[in-house]
Image: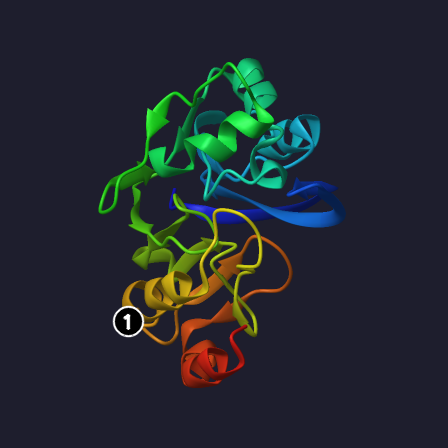
Amino acid sequence: MAARIDHLVTSGTFSLDGGTWDVDNNVWIVGNDDEAIVIDAAHDADAIFEALAGRTLRAIICTHAHNDHIDAAPALAARTGARIHLHPADLPLWKMTHPGTVPDADLTDGQVLTIAGTDLTVLHTPGHAPGAVCLYAPDLRTVFTGDTLFQGGPGATGRSFSDFPTIVTSIRDRLLTLPPETAVRTGHGDPTTIGDEAPHLDEWIKRGH
């Protein structure tokens, strides 16, 4: 059976630089009836576990290590035996949320992860965070962008560990080169497509989004 994409929204808080904000996060589950991976284990390990519906969880993939994207990862890993994968450039952020622990495996640019016969290629897209990655699944015509690209522009770069010129370069060189029909499944909010976002690059740069 071919891989499919399941989606749930979990709620919690995002904290950085002394501030805390309420947030709703998208959790993406990619797999078939037997096995799956979770992209961004946010806030509620129990809800994510229930959404797996008995499937074997092969991996927990972190698009980056802001607390709202990784806070439920250790609990979900403990419950399922799945390994947690993170780009090593985000280890300092990880340790802010989970001090004294480290993820189980590194994500590297160009690495291919396979689940239910479907390949997802890791694209290192720093800017929102140093180790931010996106996951491109051409067979699903989808890229999972975490907080790198949203409907309407780049992810936020106004806090520690982030940089606006860097995220613009990542989006321009790694994401906007994908086929325009590619669905952009984001870390928060509604999906979009590469074709819908690509025409607005110059506008983003001018306003310093």
The quarter in which the C terminus is drawn is bottom right
Q: Is residue 197 above or below residue 107?
A: below
Q: Is residue 168 left or right of residue 153?
A: left
Question: Which residue bears the numbered disc 1?
Answer: 177
Q: Residue at x 45, y 44 (%)?
A: 63
Which percent across, then down, holds residue 183? 45, 66
Amino acid type of disc 1?
Thr
Colour approach in the figure: rainbow
Secondary-structure class at tag 1: loop
Q: Is residue 199 above or below residue 106?
A: below
Q: Residue at x 46, y 31 (%)?
A: 92
Q: Is residue 26 left or right of residue 135?
A: right
Q: Residue at x 36, y 38 (%)?
A: 89
Q: Residue at x 25, y 45 (%)?
A: 109
Q: Is residue 113 above or below residue 197?
A: above
Which percent across, then down, holds residue 203? 48, 85
Which percent across, then down, holds residue 135? 37, 50
Q: In the current view of this chain or complex, which residue is farthest to the right?
A: 22
Which percent across, then down, holds residue 196? 47, 80
